[in-house]
């Protein structure tokens, strides 16, 4: 009986050791890993199960985890987590979380990252805290920090995005700057070389051409299509008989101005173009005061041309829900040129007036 009992105990211990031995072999600590390419390294075929403090591989390195410094001529493949610095000529692939700094000639790919990821082409991560810098594109699900890309940044929730072409996000906490386009459902501040698109904007939208939003009090652009803002088409005339058909569009405070027209006084410079920025300074019932900064160019499309930069103060009164009349003084700085030579140019400052009527859409 005792012999049978002893055999049973030994059998149980043996099975337990056999079952648990793979668990202990999954991540074997190893201080240094040096090699050419897997499995030609100091860790051999066991390298995918080893955790290292220092790794140097001429072509490519494979490990379970890294906690220190990792360098490979081509690529680093880390199955689990990585801490410290990972540098690769082509790519870093981290299956788990990454903390520290990752530098790759082409791509960094990891789950959740903290610290800095710098890549010549692409950075990919799920959760990012810190900075992503890529020559072409950064992709992340949620970011708390800074994304800088030569072409595109894309994230569901973003803090700060700077891209040469476009930033795409669902929610932006701080700032978006793009050479062409910014999009975000909720945004704080957007600056784009061409267009900004958002639903709710807490701060300022600045675009060379167009801003689109459901709610934006401070859009700065030639055309601002704000759902709860204001859009109007109007006719204005100044003391020099420059008559313009203008489109004004914007939010509760700021609006943009763009227009074309004709001068009925000049002989040569008769074709007019207008661009500017305005603000609703004061509003009380049907009366309000607007101020505008605008530039009006008069062209002959030959040699002569005139540019008038003006500051206008325009009291306005709504005579109906959709009709508003306005008029007031303006201070104008005028530059006139009538030949190609620089000496044939005149500049002057004068006081004028502007008035008109507009239909509020």
Image: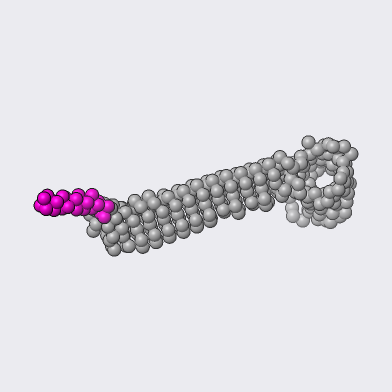
Could you tell me if residue 293 is visible in this image?
A: yes
Q: Is residue 195 visible?
A: no
- Residue at 74% x, 53% y: name it: 341
Closer to the camera, 327 or 49? 49
Q: Residue at the location (32% across, 62% down)?
A: 54
Q: Position of residue 160 (x, y in %)?
A: 57, 53
Q: Choose between 4 and 219: the one closer to the eye.
A: 4
> Measuring 49% from the left and 48% from the top, which residue is drawn there?
140
Query: In this image, 324 relative to 107: left or right?
Result: right
Magenta part, dominant SS: helix
Residue at (71% x, 42% y) in the render: 226
Start and end of the magenta stretch?
A: 1-25
Q: Is residue 60 magenta?
A: no
Quadrant position of residue 267: top right
**Quarter where residue 247 is shown:** top right
- Residue 36 percent location from the top left of the image: 26, 55
Left or right, residue 156 beside residue 258: left
Q: Is residue 241 left or right of residue 306?
A: right
Outermost residue toward the front in this view? 1
Magenta segment includes 22:
yes
| Rendering colour mode | one colour
x then y, percent, for residue 209: 67, 44
Viewer-proximal residue among 343 and 178: 178
Please identify the quadrant where the C terminus is shown: top right
Residue 20 at what x, y percent from top left? Answer: 25, 52
Q: Total label count?
A: 0
């Amino acid at each position: 009986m005792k012999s049978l009992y002893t055999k049973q105990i030994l059998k149980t211990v043996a099975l337990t050791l056999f079952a648990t031995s793979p668990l202990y072999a999954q991540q074997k600590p190893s201080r240094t890993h040096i090699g050419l390419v897997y499995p030609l390294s100091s860790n051999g075929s066991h390298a995918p199960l080893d955790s290292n403090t220092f790794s140097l591989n001429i072509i490519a390195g494979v490990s379970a985890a890294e906690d220190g410094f990792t360098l490979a001529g081509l690529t680093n493949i880390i199955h689990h987590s990585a801490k410290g610095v990972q540098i690769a000529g082509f790519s870093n692939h981290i299956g788990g979380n990454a903390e520290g700094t990752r530098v790759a000639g082409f791509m960094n790919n990891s789950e959740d990252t903290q610290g800095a990821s710098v890549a010549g082409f692409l950075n990919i991560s799920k959760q990012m805290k810190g900075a992503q810098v890529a020559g072409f594109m950064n992709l992340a699900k949620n970011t708390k920090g800074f994304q800088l890309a030569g072409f595109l940044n894309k994230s569901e929730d973003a803090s700060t995005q700077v891209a040469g072409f476009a930033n795409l996000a669902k929610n932006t906490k701080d700032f978006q700057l793009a050479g062409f386009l910014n999009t975000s459902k909720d945004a704080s501040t957007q600056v784009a070389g061409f267009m900004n698109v958002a639903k709710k904007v807490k701060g300022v939208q600045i675009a060379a051409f167009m801003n689109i939003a459901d709610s934006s009090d401070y859009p700065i652009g030639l055309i601002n299509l704000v759902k709860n803002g204001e859009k109007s088409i109007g006719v204005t005339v100044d003391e020099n008989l420059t008559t313009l058909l203008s489109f004004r569009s914007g939010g509760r405070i700021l609006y943009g101005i763009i227009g074309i027209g004709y001068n009925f006084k000049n002989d040569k410079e008769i074709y007019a173009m207008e661009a500017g920025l305005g603000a609703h300074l004061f509003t009380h019932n049907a009366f309000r005061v607007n101020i505008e900064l605008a530039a009006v160019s008069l062209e002959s499309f030959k040699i002569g041309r005139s540019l008038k930069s003006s500051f206008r103060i325009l009291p306005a009164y709504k005579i109906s829900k959709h009709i508003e009349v306005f008029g007031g003084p303006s201070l104008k700085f005028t530059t006139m040129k009538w030949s190609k030579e620089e000496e044939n140019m005149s500049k002057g400052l004068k006081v004028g007036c502007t008035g008109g009527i507009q239909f509020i859409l």
